[in-house]
Image (cartoon, grey):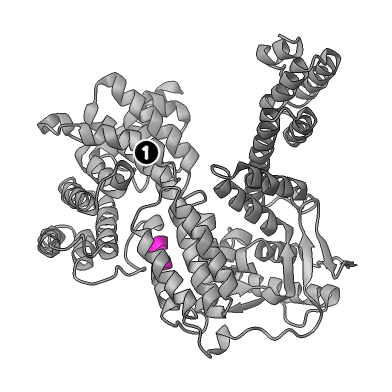
Amino acid sequence: MKEASGDVLFALECRVIELAGEWPPDGPARVPTDWWTRSPVVAAAYGRKRMDEGGYAEARAALSTAVRGFGRLGETGPMRAAIAWLACLDLRLGETGEAAVGLRFLSEEIWDGEEAAGGRADSAFALGFGGYAIGWNTRQRLLHLEEAVYAFVDEDRPERASSAVFAWKRLAGAAAPEAAGFDARAAAMQRRLAQKALWNEAYGWHAEAFGRGRIRPEAPLGAYERLTARAAALRAKLLEGGEPGDVREAEALAEELASRFPGAVEHRMERLLLTAAARARRGDRGGAEAELLEAEALFELGLPPEYRPAIELAAVAVRAGGGASDAPASEPVEETGPAPVRIRCFGGLRIERQGALVPEPKWKRKKAEELFIFLLLRPGHAAPKEQVLDALFPDAEPSKASNQLYVAIYEVNRALKESCGWEDGAALRDGVVALPEHRVEEVDVEKYTTLVRVADQLHPTQADVSEELYESAAELYGSLLPKLPYVEWLARLRDELEWKQERILERLAAGARERNETEREERFLRMRAELAPLQEPAVQELLRLYARTGRTAEAKRLFEAFERRLLAEDGERPSPETKRLADGL
């Protein structure tokens, strides 16, 4: 079996090398982690693939393994390439300091013939994409992105060349004064790409991109760049006036930005700017200004300087009224019928109106309940039809899935009319499935994530205010809709929220420990241990507190209870470190 596995790995490695280090289109969706250590070539290609898909944790692990593997083998060129993509990943996640370490290393290297083979294009792209993190100006970044375009073309890597073209155009468009004099260089790149397109039609779009002002959202880009281009185009449209339906589309796209590449700060910025434009279009100037304030705070964390003009342009439009017009889609919704409701999802579904409980909807179909919850947990309580179909009916044929969706919408409306008295329930318009936003005053999950997001931004500079917000969020938290049957999208959201809560409790306990507030520290540590009853780090922190305060009997009881639970659930015993802490050592 091992020999067969080795043959498969060798064949995959050969295929990756044949494709200049890129993952084969017909390659496996997942590979065993031990393959990474056995083949840094596979690790590097797989890491870039997972980064392109939004699997950032796995991408980081694979790329880090590739760097170490290439380093041991003395393969300096491929090692630089892996470092370059690690830097790009750090930049995407807003970890500018980490990225700067790799970028400085790349900027100090001397390219010398064969020694740089396999790393020149990737390094040039990383330095052009993220050079701002090490103090580079626009001209330096444009020159390196230009080098990346040529190098990716020479290596025949059209997808990476596409990313470099997109980054070059975007940077040049955002910094027109600094990019002055680059027209001739753009024309030269266009000629080179047109020449390449004669041999490989995949480069046809690359050449066309230099012949127009703004890159179209429908261009053949990677998923990350395509979403970025769609957001920028729709934001510009809204700020210029827009059309009926643009606000709904903006709200749906904002959700897609959040869910498709979670953790990407650039998409978080795009989402804030897009939502600000949508709110301004609706006439909600206060809401739009709040989004812009958050965008300003996010910008200071280390986003590319080309976002500064975008923020300023959005601010000017908001102050001028945001392009609001008399279009029916932008008029405030007339408040008729019953008052809006507040909905709690933590701990189980609970609907309240003006302090009184509303009867829980009676669902005749499970998919109707799932659709209601799915929309409820999306910003603006709306999502593109395709996203709904993928989440709720992943295995159904397209025509059958659409029919099932219409049935689910009908059942949602029937149940909500009986329960909440809504005459206007879920609806499918302009390719977007939505609940009537004015009927829902508050959803606890949305409030929770907002509190955490603002607290995260304030934590580095205003720890006291940040802790107050964290504590408010921690009190809201509970098991997310525990009675709802398992569905993949909901399981992912549960895991994400549980991770947020663990991080919040860890920060609250650390703050209390710094101020010698033992009772508060213990409360937060207990909450963390209850949230993750089988995780040793949570128990270890509580044991450390008992050791500091001389509570040996409580430490022993806690350890024994944890040991019994771990044996019963996993058939394992606590680590020696946990035992040492329980003994007060």
Badge 1: few (under 14), some or many (20 or more) residues near its Cα, within 10 Å?
Answer: many
Residue 108 vertical position relative to residue 95 in the rendered view, above or below: above
Viewed as shown, does residue 175 lie left or right of 404? left
Report if residue 555 lies within the magenta region: no
**What kind of residue is marked 1?**
Ala
List x then y, in percent, for residue 424.
72, 81
Q: Is residue 199 visible?
A: yes
Q: Residue at x 70, y 10 (%)?
A: 580
The residue tagged 1 is: 99
Q: Is residue 436 visible?
A: no
Q: In the picture, residue 64 is in which quadrant? A: top left
Judging depth in this view, the residue of 459 and 209 nearest the camera is 459
List x then y, in percent, for residue 185.
12, 59
Judging depth in this view, the residue of 52 and 188 nearest the camera is 188
Judging depth in this view, the residue of 345 and 300 nearest the camera is 300
Q: In the picture, residue 514 is in which quadrant? A: top right
Residue 130 vertical position relative to residue 568 in the rendered view, above or below: below
Principal SS element in the magenta part?
Answer: helix
List x then y, in percent, for residue 188.
10, 60
Viewed as shown, does residue 536 lie left or right of 326? right
Q: Quadrant of the C terminus?
A: top right
Circle 1 sits in a helix, a strand or a loop, which is it?
A: helix
Judging depth in this view, the residue of 33 and 275 nearest the camera is 275
Q: In the picture, residue 288 is in which quadrant? A: bottom right
Q: Residue at x 44, y 51 (%)?
A: 300
List x then y, in percent, for residue 507.
64, 36
Viewed as shown, does residue 341 lie left or right of 314? right
Image: magenta residue range = 226-231
